[in-house]
Image (tube, rainbow, N blue to C red):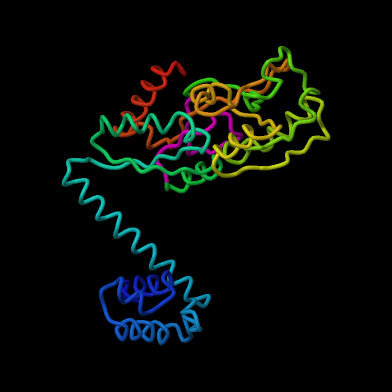
Amino acid sequence: MNPKYLVQLATIIELGSVTKAAQKLNTTQPTLSRTVKVIEDRVGSAVLRRGRHGVTPTEIGMRLAEAGREIMRRSQQAETTIQEWKHGRTGEIRVGVGPMLAATVMGDFFAEMVVSPPNYGVKIFCEYAARLVERLNNGQLDLAIIPYDLNRSEDKLVRERLFQDRLAVFVGSNDPLTGKTSVSPQDLSQHQWISVGEISGLFDVTRETLDRLGLPDVTPTLENTGDVTMTFRILELTKSCSMLPFRLLGSIQKRFDIAPVDLNVELPARNVGFWTTIPGRDLPEIVDFLARLNGYLHKMRLN
């Protein structure tokens, strides 16, 4: 199968129109129609369904389009490599960052890398921790900045603790509990709990901690697996609370009207770690990246 045909099919399916695909690919509609016929002759069945509002893929059409998208992705990656080489960059590292870290310290860190760029490119992926570990194992990432204490035992990965942190219960700054010392778990029983678990691997911790606090009947009202700043906004506007990393939130607390309560029970540690593969740990780009990150965290008094 000509890879060009798969790219053309992927473009048709993405845009839902042969005409629009022809415009994007700077070719003609009859040319793309012939491409579709060649593919269908090879497959022995239709790859597109034609309807009033354009075209949609059949099952085999969807699978072939995925192959076409992969070809486009690798082609774009090759073009990026060429441009990086022309600009003196020696390579590229793919960095995974959990959304909690992305919303707190990592944005400012990457801003420093823009001001003082390395001689390699950096591609950032922001997803929840379990997915980033999966990407590391699959060779789709070179390193990840995520919670250190995940219950993972992959032999191919190594992790180093960047700094210590612990969980704390946060509420809106105007909540009466922010002015109270020695807050008991029962003081929080009337609050709505917001879980931000999956983005940092915390869902189980939330349930376990509620049980430990003597609040077995409390169930989180919302489980947020997306942008953590949405949780911060909910805390600002409602009588709600959430378990969040204490030191991470302290680094940006002034940006949001939220504050930790003075809970009289110690909550679990939530340390932050640097994860990579065993072969990748000594790569010059990763060594340089880690040195920059540790320098930044030291300046922020986090490590």
* Image height of 207 relative to 173, above or below: below
* Image height of 219 relative to 257, above or below: below
Residue located 17% across and 43% down the image: 87
* Image height of 176 relative to 109, above or below: above
Among the 4 quarters of the image, the one containing residue 238 = top right
Indicate the position of residue 18 as horizontal and vertical percent values.
Answer: 38, 79
Indicate the position of residue 102 as horizontal and vertical percent values.
Answer: 47, 35
Pick the front one: 230 or 32: 230
Pick the front one: 296 or 285: 296
- Give yes or no for residue 157 being in the magenta stretch: yes
| The furthest residue to the top | 181
* Image height of 230 relative to 267, above or below: below
Pick the front one: 138 or 163: 163
Q: Which residues are magenta?
A: 141-161
- Give yes or no for residue 186 being in the magenta stretch: no
Pick the front one: 80 or 3: 80
Q: Quadrant of the N terminus?
A: bottom left
Residue located 39% across and 30% down the image: 108
Q: Is residue 260 left or right of residue 97?
A: right
Indicate the position of residue 204 as horizontal and vertical percent values.
Answer: 69, 36
Q: Is residue 281 left or right of residue 222?
A: left
Indicate the position of residue 181 as horizontal and vertical percent values.
Answer: 71, 12
Total number of numbered labels? 0
